[in-house]
């Protein structure tokens, strides 16, 4: 084989391998059709959860570049916006440190430039832990319905003044059922992935899930409901029925 033919054959093999890897990453789970009406960065084509050992990998594929769109900064917490890639699950909220049965437990990868809610972590490495909310980071949140957010809308569950619910050790101090566990999300090309360790991986293996891309907003008066889901860009299942099965 001539050098030029060898180079072409090698390049073709590499391209085929890369395509196979990319295709394999989007196999299984919930498959969704693209929608030209949705921003490609939030247009879900695939969502799945897999486990290996005690680690669960939450995966979402989109039609465009994941994480390429960020919410606009408003300069204050009141009315601040957030974007999120979200995996609602059937896992009980008690499994990650909240009160049991508190609501829908969801893993979220979020960005919100007007506030920082990961006080234990310095995502941008500038020795300041309270100025990097714009960088994509992970949360556990408990979601519940609240008509005050709008008909059929969800919110991150509020903690009423004076209440003392069970909360994870990495709760960031906000009056919300939210955790900032520090799981580093990977946003690369058309995918978002987060690896999450569990004490009991069986609770994940038996769970169901969905995939959602959404916009949230902090209350303009900082009163409950404090953090509403105001926009649902896409839902992998189309109806938030949590049809996904782990490792399928």
Image (cartoon, rainbow, N blue to C red):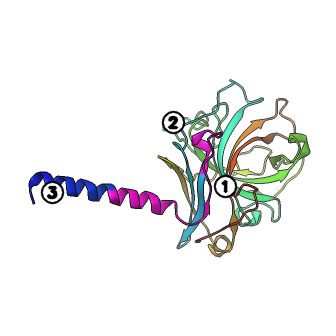
Where is residue 210 shown, x and y percent of the image? 69, 59
Q: Is disc 3 in contact with disc 1, using a CB cutoff of under 8 Å?
A: no
Count the numbered circles shown: 3
| In magenta segment, residue 199 | no
Q: Is residue 85 left or right of residue 98?
A: left
Mark 3 nearby-residue class (10 Å; few <14, some 14–19, many ≥20): few
Judged from the image, the secondary structure of the residue bearing numbered disc 2 is loop
> Of marks 2 and 1, which one's residue comes earlier in the chain?
2
> Of marks 2 and 3, which one's residue comes earlier in the chain?
3
Distance between the alpha carbons at the discs numbered 2 and 1: 38 Å
| Viewer can see residue 117 | no
Judged from the image, the secondary structure of the residue bearing numbered disc 3 is helix
Where is residue 5 shown, x and y percent of the image? 15, 55
Where is residue 35 shown, x and y percent of the image? 63, 45
Above or below for 9 versus 90: above
Mark 2 nearby-residue class (10 Å; few <14, some 14–19, many ≥20): few
| Viewer can see residue 233 | yes
Distance between the alpha carbons at the discs numbered 3 and 1: 43 Å
Find disc 3 in the rendering and name its residue.
6
Which of the labelled discs sits on residue 127, or is there none?
Answer: 2
* Disc nearest the viewer among 2 and 1: 1
Find disc 1 in the rendering and name its residue.
236
Q: Is residue 104 left or right of residue 83?
A: right
- The residue range painted magenta reads 16-44
Q: Quadrant of the C terminus?
A: bottom right
Q: Nearer the viewer, residue 209 or 112?
A: 209
């Amino acid at each position: 084989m001539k050098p030029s033919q060898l180079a072409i054959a090698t390049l073709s093999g590499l391209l085929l391998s890369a395509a196979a890897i990319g295709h394999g990453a989007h196999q299984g789970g919930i498959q969704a059709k693209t929608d030209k009406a949705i921003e490609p960065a939030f247009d879900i084509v695939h969502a799945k959860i897999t486990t290996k050992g005690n680690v669960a990998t939450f995966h979402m594929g989109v039609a465009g570049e994941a994480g390429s769109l960020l919410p606009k900064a408003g300069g204050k917490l009141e009315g601040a916006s957030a974007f999120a890639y979200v995996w609602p699950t059937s896992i009980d909220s008690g499994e990650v440190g909240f009160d049991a049965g508190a609501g829908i437990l969801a893993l979220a990868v979020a960005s919100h430039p007007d506030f920082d809610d990961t006080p234990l972590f310095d995502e941008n490495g500038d020795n300041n832990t309270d100025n990097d909310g714009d960088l994509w980071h992970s949360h556990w949140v408990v979601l519940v319905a609240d008509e005050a957010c709008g008909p059929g809308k969800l919110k991150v569950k509020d903690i009423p003044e004076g209440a003392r619910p069970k909360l994870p050790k990495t709760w960031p101090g906000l009056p919300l059922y939210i955790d900032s566990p520090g799981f580093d999300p990977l946003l690369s090309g058309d995918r978002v992935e987060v690896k999450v360790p569990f004490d009991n991986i069986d609770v994940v293996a038996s769970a169901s899930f969905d995939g959602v891309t959404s916009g949230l907003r902090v209350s303009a008066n900082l009163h409950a409901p404090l953090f509403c889901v105001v926009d649902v860009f896409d839902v992998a299942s189309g109806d938030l029925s949590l049809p996904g099965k782990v490792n399928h």
